[in-house]
Image: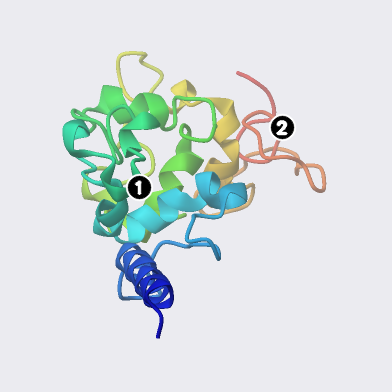
Amino acid sequence: MSTPRIFRTCLAAAISLLFWGCAGKSTDTAPKFNELGQHPKATWLNTHWSEYAKQPDQCITCHGSVKDPAKAGGVSQVSCFSCHPNGPGHPTGWAAGDQHGRLGAKAAAGDWSGLASCARCHGSDYTGGLSKVSCKTCHTKAPHADKPWRNLDPNLSNHDGVDVSNAAECIKCHAAGSPNNPAGFPATPPAPGATPGCYNNTMCHDRNP
């Protein structure tokens, strides 16, 4: 075998080993790559959080540390901190209610805010999901705070502070006629196919009180 051919064969083997190392040993939890050994750019930014949540350590092989910016980047030279200033996962102090509360029920629903964003990692019922961490560990009545949830005192946890764009999550438990909807509410049934909302008969109210 000629020297150039041997070199090409060895180079191909080395590249294959690199990609294998990045992908990990399990095809069920490995990052997704295209035929060039890259993440599929068309969809990866919208879905990579789920792969990270399955097995965070798999990202370290190619992207370096996910905890120390000085050691981030790895062989890919792409640092997770370039998009996540505080690194992947929740920032320091997240356990405080004024931290995750603002980006949970009290925030407008968006890519990384609102109750639906919590459900991405903690499951649609908030009992663990991909993260294996249940919101009910702290919030025994998750996804909202413990009673007095219906108290109107602005100094207490209360549901009137929830952003109405989170109604699609609230209706999972509080749809008209469901066990978690107060008896007799709403007074009139919702319109067929009505978008979940706080004041349109789909849950407890027919208007803003």
Which dot marks residue 93? none
Q: Where residue 65 sits in the image (x, y, percent)?
A: 21, 44
C-alpha separation, residue under disc 1 versus residue under disc 2: 50 Å
> Is mark 1 in CB contact (under 8 Å) with mark 2?
no
Percent from the top left, x then y, of residue 189? 75, 44
Task: Give the residue furthest to the top.
Answer: 154
Asked where in the image residue 11 lies, by quadrant, the reply is bottom left
Rendering colour mode: rainbow
Q: Quadrant of the N terminus?
A: bottom left
Identity of the residue drawn at 24% across and 42% down: 66
Residue at 51% x, 51% y is: 47
Residue at position x 26%, y 27% in the image:
97
Report which residue position mark 1 lands on: 76
Left or right side of 24 for 161: right
Q: Nearer the viewer, residue 109 or 8?
A: 8
Give percent across and percent down for residue 159. Answer: 44, 28
Amino acid type of the residue tagged 2 in the rendering? Asn
In the picture of the structure, the residue carrying the numbered disc 2 is: 200
The residue closer to the viewer here, 91 or 184, is 91
Report the amino acid beneath label 1: Ser
Q: Is residue 95 above or below residue 62?
A: above
